[in-house]
Amino acid sequence: MIEFRGVTKRFPDGTVAVDELDLVAEQGRITVFVGPSGCGKTTSLRMINRMVEPTSGELRVDGQDVLAADPAELRRGIGYVIQQAGLFPHRTVVDNIATVPMLLGTGRRAARDLAMELMETVGLDTAMASRYPSQLSGGQQQRVGVARALAADPPVLLMDEPFSAVDPVVRESLQEELLRLQSELGKTIVFVTHDIDEAIKLGDRVAVFRVGGKLAQYDEPGVLLSRPVDDFVDSFVGRDRGYRGLGFLTSATIPLGSLETLSVGDRRPDSGWAVVLDDTGRPLGWVEAGDGVVTEDGIVPGGSLYAVGSGSLRGALDAALSSPSGQGVAVDADGRVAGSVTADAVLAALPAARDDSAA
């Protein structure tokens, strides 16, 4: 657990970067700091491992006052991931990851064995172990940075805009990987971003900062979206916060409709659209009514899929809206087609989902 108690950071020129911050980052959860440039979110993060010294107030990590701790000893229990990964360019991937265990006294062979295991943990092919950072993509470098931060098995992980320098597709992949890792490892993570969508997706709780280092609101993502405390938070979260809020409402009450399904080589439908399945019952895409048979070249991409049982209203609505037929494809846990969902069905289920959320 990380506790800020009236923490202020004032620089020598009089600038107040963080102003009387009171906040608790819960153990085993992801806490996200978000806000505009100059709001003190990175300064707040860096005070946790004493890369920046608080001017006043009390900051505790697992009950220990950080100012009373030896900085080197404090940082051994805190992993740190930054925007550009911060890798040593002259060391291979495996040696970059093995650096921290070796500094802590682990033998070279054992440290490298651990590094290879961590590569697999963060989704990196171990065939890349002998490559240098310059031979990796931006997303691969960030995975190495995460692996290195995990190498000493720290209970706390600080992440300062780690995914902001990669393209949107890679960024989404890294976000999913972080959520997967957290579900397995249960670290106490403090994550800084300027992107409210990233904050809402990753955070168990989200702290919105305003310029001047003031904490504007600290809440669970669903509460932040549905009940912003003032105009600043409302504006920062964005006008489409109602749509984002659907991501926190269960889709369990949505009834599934039927779908016409075909395989490659079958005759095209007489009217409307049909879903084309592969040999395992998983969707390949859509085909519209017409003459002739279904060919692979004639399949239209099907949009996003709605996962039954683990889905949200946002996922269901997105599946319906992104489908060329207006029907979202619902799939079971194995990815096989389970039925269809429409935008009308999502809207009809909204009142009950809100009642369940409020209960």
Image: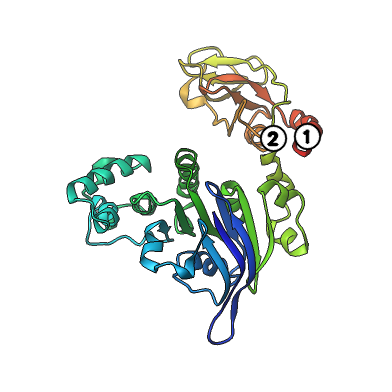
> 10 Å neighbourhood of mark 1: few (<14), some, or many (≥20)?
some
Res 346 quadrant in image: top right
> Residue at horizontal 73%, vertical 54%?
239
Q: Which residue is mark 2?
A: 313
Screen quadrant of the N terminus: bottom right
Q: Is residue 134 left or right of residue 7?
A: left
Residue positioned 45% across, 41% down in the render: 185
The answer to whether residue 221 shows anywhere in this view is: yes
Which residue corresponds to mark 1? 350
Q: Is residue 288 left or right of residue 225?
A: left
The part of the image, by quadrant, that contains residue 302 is top right
- In the rendered image, the vertical position of residue 340 relative to residue 6, given as above or below: above
Q: Residue 309, how many percent across, how many down?
A: 62, 26
Badge 2: few (under 14), some or many (20 or more) residues near its Cα, within 10 Å? many
Q: Could you tell me the amino acid type at mark 2?
A: Leu
Q: Residue at x 51, y 64 (%)?
A: 45
* Helix, strand or loop under label 2: helix
Give the total of numbered labels: 2
Residue 113, placed above or below residue 165: above
Q: What is the x, y in percent for residue 107?
A: 19, 50
The answer to whether residue 292 is seen in the rendering is no
The quarter of the image holding the C terminus is top right
